[in-house]
Image: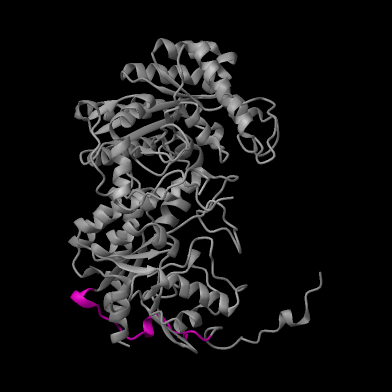
Amino acid sequence: MHVTPNLYDYWPYAGRPKIEWPGGKKLAFWIAPNIEFYEFMPRGNPKRQPWPNAIPNVQQYSQRDFGNRVGHLRLMELLDRHNLRGSVSLNVALCDHHPEIIEDCVKRDWEFFSHGIYNTRYSYGLTPQQEQAVLDDSIETVEKATGQRIRGYLAPALTHTEHTLDLIAENDFWYSCDLFQDDQPQPLKTKTGKLVSMPYSLEVNDVITYSVMGFDPDRYTDILKRHFDQLLLEGERSGTVMCIPLHAYLVSQPNRIKMFEQALKHIRAHQDDVWFATGSEIAKHFIDNYWDSSLEDIKQRGMMTGGTGFAS
Amino acid sequence: MNIPKDYLEYPKRSYGQDHDYYDWGLAKDRTKLSWDNDAKVAISFIIPLEFFPLNPSGEPFKHPGAMVTPYPDLRHFTVRDYGNRVGVFRILEALDAADVKATFAVNSEIARHYPPLLEAILSAGHEIAAHGKSTDHIHHEGLTAEEETGLIESTFTHMPRGTRGWLSPARNQSSKTLEHLAQCDVDYCLDWEMDQVPVTATTKNGTVTLIPNSYELSDFTLLHTRRQSEEAWLSQMKASIDLLLEEHVRFGAQMLNLTLTPYVIGQPFRIWALRGLLAHIKDTAHVSVFTAGDIASQFTKQK
């Protein structure tokens, strides 16, 4: 076991070289609906059981199913009204279970990235070959269902091995949503490829704000507005990224979705300064324009430590 | 299980404290203090800069904020690291805009691995206090005297020269920590909070000034553990200042030590509340911000 992951170098936020998003925009905004499938009778993983009490868990399972049957459409229509495209964090088995939802996303030209096969199958204990099989399955399943080659990854239920990021880089993924250390993208230290650490978010993720912190809808909207305002202010110095990760089984509940719309209205009112993009669009722009200058700045500050993730 | 007979014997049962570090005394009987700038309320901000290893031993207990999910818990490692990379710079910017100096309590693992962070703090004129080695190096009763003084000494080798203050990881001490801190020439300690003014601890190796450090007012406690709103945090900070101003006539000048945790208050959606507090302090007469070391010095002169 390692003391640090060594997946990225220390890079103080102050004084970084300026990032500009296309059109001179200050903040890259993306929205990531998680479209998930939780199994009714999941296989347990030795390191973690899918539900805290017992299997099956009818309340939890059916709340997730509510997200699929009712919630996604509410959210899709809300994003349509505000002319926003989603970047879908997808449990790819959903392509087999509920292809109608995938078709609805494809119609809207949404992007897909892999969030594993099921949210109830964890990465803990997988061999690199088994994890490669998850990636092959992810790439093939989404390509078959949508024609898209996925470029992003968020490990299922945020479960990792020491090999996860090396493997996705090797498979020509462009971005990882697995790390939360920054509000700007940064090159990751993988053995091969060019993999960007893409700001996703736990702090403004509806799972954290609603299920963990227990905030009410007004407070969530207030947090989103303030989060956006601060990152936009800082984006003037060097472009920032804001992501809103969402789960329809939470945000699309009837007590929440209208209040959430107020946050989107606030953000959409700043169109002149904001680049509304998808995960891969942000990653590509960063790789094409700022990959080398970021590494150069880290080097100049004497913080380039060498090695790659989980290898010294 | 049999409870031994001496369980109902109370050898320390007598007037005052049950330890020898300081004497018992009521707030109303204290000698009144005064602070520089004619301040009736002194505030010091403590900003902990903590290193959370990916593979903590969790001994003798899990440090608040330590890893949660099975190894490798990249989620919590990076959420904590956010504070040291991004959040702390928001705090520094807010302090700088308000022209206020704070005390940064630094794990030696942070000092060792993140030198640009220390440079940024020192070049802005803030104070550094030692904060042990890391969140996985908790001081506790199970350590020998050699182990504990070794941890303290090795921590100071990574601190800037002249570092005078100490905050224990998780604010946990052994019953001998103060003795060991005195032996290592530590001037002040931020682990205790038994009064609204500093208190001198006496040990066989000399004295240590205990600067009270409020758990109940810490941003970690209110915003993170208790999940209160930023509005509620800010209004509680203001209410605390108001109360101490009100008490000045009876109890003299008092102080507040306020913790600002980079991965908590340094979030984009929270930093406004710190700016709000700093503006309130600036606009309120007889309230001044000092470093913890400065408060220790002012207190020592009045002893």
Q: Outermost residue, right direction? A: B2
Coloration of the structure image: one colour
Residue A201 visible in the current orientation: yes
Residue in the image at 57% along x and 53% along y: B55
Determine if the magenta segment contains residue B24.
Answer: yes
User: Which one is in front, A256 or B73?
Assistant: B73
Seen in the picture, residue A244 relative to B285 is either above or below; the reply is above
Determine if the magenta segment contains residue A224.
Answer: no
Looking at the picture, how far across and down is residue A276, in whole percent?
A: 30, 25
Work out which quarter of the rendered image holds the C terminus of chain B and state it: bottom left
Looking at the picture, how far across and down is residue B292, in whole percent?
A: 33, 72
Q: How many marks?
A: 0
- The part of the chain drawn in magenta is B20-39
Task: Give left or right: position of A149 versus B283.
Answer: right
Looking at the picture, how far across and down is residue B204, in whole percent?
A: 50, 89
Looking at the picture, how far across and down is residue A95, in whole percent?
A: 55, 15
User: Which one is in front, A284 or A199?
Assistant: A284
Seen in the picture, residue B251 relative to A1 is either above or below; the reply is below
Look at the magenta stretch and give its main secondary structure.
Answer: loop
Task: Give left or right: position of B194 versus B243.
Answer: right
Residue in the image at 52% along x and 27% along y: A115
Task: Give left or right: position of A139 versus B164.
Answer: right
User: Which one is in front, A247 or A166?
Assistant: A166
Work out which quarter of the rendered image holds the N terminus of chain B and state it: bottom right
Residue in the image at 38% along x and 69% along y: B159
Seen in the picture, residue B42 relative to A277 is either above or below; the reply is below
Residue B264 visible in the current orientation: no
